[in-house]
Amino acid sequence: MSPQEYYGAGFPYRPATELLGKLIVLEGSDGVGRSTQINMLRTWLEADGYAVSDTGLRRSNLTQPGLDAAKLGHTLGRQTMSLFYATDFSDRLENQIIPALKAGFHVLSDRYFYSIIARDIVRGADPVWARKIYDVALKPDIVFYLRADVPALVKRMIHGRGFDFWESGMDMHFAGDLYDSFCIYQSRLIEQFDQMAKEYGFITIDATRPIPVVFENLKREIKPLLEEESY
């Protein structure tokens, strides 16, 4: 049974007890390969007989339509967007993540609140304020930080889905084109992730290596966590 705690007050009416599953989080920059690894981990865990649920940003039934519309219009203020994402996170935590953990599902989270904090701070939010919003958050059982430098991320974007307005931080006016803005924005995000890795105890994984190598690294770290169930 997981001895999870909240980072702050949490949900007073929903104590973090009797959580039978594990909360496994993958963090990292845009294009670092989180979604690929989440899919591979889910297949591996399910093949071993575990019940698995996965989640990620903007997957709340309550907020997803509004957030998607807001990102299309680029009209909401930065603080409003911060609170919108915090609402999305809180709703998923209360109504998706915690119920799944109570039911014995291992939850794979493609990003948690750490990414939102990093984005908010890069956009000028006060670091203390940005963290305080997520006092409601449950502490994960393990957090992996998939780390790649900017040149590696650029290469993946060029040979993958291409550059995106938000992933390039174009709303910040760092540069006049997607490429240069992406490099500046992602560099600043990485600085925040590096800091949070120490603050929150992330396990840093070199994500510049081949996908199968990263996957085996993740499995090695997760296996001891799963074995705790037998004790």
Image: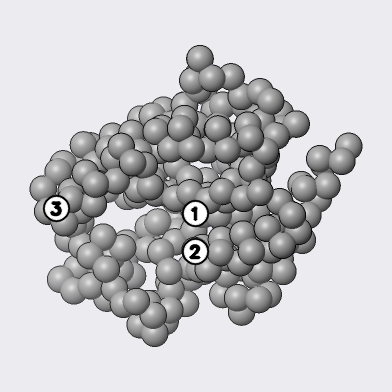
Q: Quadrant of the N terminus?
A: top right
Q: Is residue 146 above or below residue 179?
A: above
Q: In the image, which is nearer the foreground, mark 3 or mark 2?
A: 2
Q: Nearer the viewer, residue 161 or 191?
A: 161
Task: Please state the horizontal and vertical placement of residue 187, each as a whole percent of the image.
Answer: 39, 63
Residue, disc 1: 110
Three-letter amino acid code at the position of disc 3? His
Residue most toward the bottom?
159
Task: Please state the horizontal and vertical placement of residue 21, each as a whole percent of the image.
Answer: 67, 39
Residue, disc 3: 74
Q: Residue at x 43, y 37 (%)?
A: 92
Using the numbered discs, state the Cα–Cα distance from disc 3 to disc 1 in whole angstroms.
24 Å
Residue, disc 2: 35
Three-letter amino acid code at the position of disc 2? Ser
* Colour scheme in use: one colour
Left or right position of 57 against 178: right
Using the numbered discs, state the Cα–Cα distance from disc 1 to disc 2 in whole angstroms.
6 Å
Residue 207 appears in view: yes
Kindly state the secondary structure of the residue where label 1 is placed: strand
Q: Nearer the viewer, residue 46 or 58?
A: 46
